[in-house]
């Protein structure tokens, strides 16, 4: 039973802004699940409203049940009402893209993005999963996540090296996570995309562990100076504290200490 659920959720992950519709053969090939099993799962998802089939093209797309769950989530745990104004402020003050992510089982999911008004900017694809080990958001989350979550994330068979700056050695990653936890924020220059540098701070739940992150993604050439990096760090840490407290959580002491140090600098 659990294997079927895992496969169904795995198939849903292939529906993105770039590829919102899939034919049966293409989806089976992409997911590496045989065609008969893929069809059986899609039929079950259609029956429950999570997928629908276009009457003419016969391609599959997400169904309205996804919207219903999203509305339930936001009504019962209204993150976006806190986060969107904060992102707007960050993007305006930093003149770079600001975005918020939540942790899923294997990567970070973008839930909100605000872009600056300037023409040259980093585009954050809202449907693209951000890898834990290669993004500022993922590293900031893992540094303050529970030990079990951190171990699971680092136990993947093979960590993808997206750029020359991506760290894939587990021991080196563990050392880096400890440094991030001490510093209070993550800085990732060109680790996921060469042209983009990210600075992120964790968002905390009332358990004391991180469950997401708030980040600024800037054009790498504009994020090389210490002043720019520290300004971005101050903004994301202030946002981390604001959002965490707004949902009834208290940030980690290291984040509060970093906030004070950056404000006093």
Image (tube, rainbow, N blue to C red):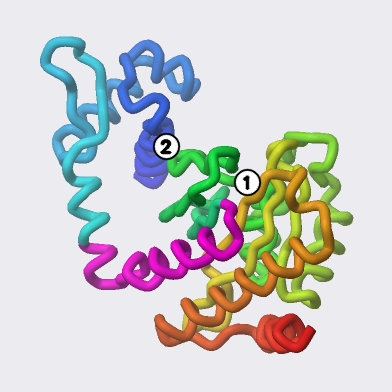
Q: Look at the image and tell me in which quarter the C terminus lies.
A: bottom right
Q: Main secondary structure of the magenta part?
A: helix
Residue 164 is covered by the magenta coloring: no
- Circle on res. 13: 2
Residue at 64% across / 63% down in the picture? 200
Q: Residue furthest front?
A: 118
Residue at 44% across / 22% down in the picture? 33
Q: Please give left or right for residue 163 compared with residue 29 in the image.
A: right
Comes first in the chain, label 2 or label 1: 2
Task: Specify whether residue 103 is in view.
Answer: no
Give the extent of the magenta segment. 72-96
- Circle on res. 131: 1
Relative depth, front residue between 42 and 214: 214
Task: Specify whether residue 178 is in view.
Answer: yes
Relative depth, front residue between 214 and 37: 214
Give SS at disc 1: strand
């Amino acid at each position: 039973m659990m294997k079927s659920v895992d496969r169904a959720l795995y198939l849903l992950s292939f529906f993105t802004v770039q590829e919102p519709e899939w034919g049966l053969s293409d989806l089976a090939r992409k997911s590496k699940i045989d065609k008969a099993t893929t069809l059986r799962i899609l039929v079950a998802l259609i029956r429950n409203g999570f997928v629908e089939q276009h009457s003419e093209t016969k391609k599959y797309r997400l169904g309205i049940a996804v919207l219903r769950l999203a509305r339930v989530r936001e009504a019962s745990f209204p993150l976006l009402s806190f986060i969107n104004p904060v992102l707007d402020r960050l993007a305006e003050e930093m003149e770079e893209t600001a975005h918020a992510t939540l942790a899923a089982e294997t990567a970070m999911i973008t839930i909100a993005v605000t872009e600056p008004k300037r023409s040259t900017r980093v585009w954050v694809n809202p449907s693209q999963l951000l890898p834990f080990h290669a993004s500022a958001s993922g590293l900031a989350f893992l540094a303050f996540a529970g030990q079990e979550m951190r171990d699971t994330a680092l136990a993947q068979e093979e960590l993808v090296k997206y750029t020359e700056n991506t760290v894939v050695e587990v021991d080196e990653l563990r050392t880096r996570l400890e440094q991030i936890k001490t510093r209070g924020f993550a800085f990732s220059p060109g680790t996921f995309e060469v042209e983009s540098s990210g600075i992120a701070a964790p968002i905390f739940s009332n358990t004391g562990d991180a469950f997401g992150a708030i980040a600024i993604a800037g054009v790498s050439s504009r994020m090389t100076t210490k002043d720019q990096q520290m300004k971005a760090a101050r903004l994301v840490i202030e946002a981390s504290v604001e959002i965490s407290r707004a949902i009834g959580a208290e940030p980690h002491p290291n984040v509060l200490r970093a906030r004070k140090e950056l404000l006093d600098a």
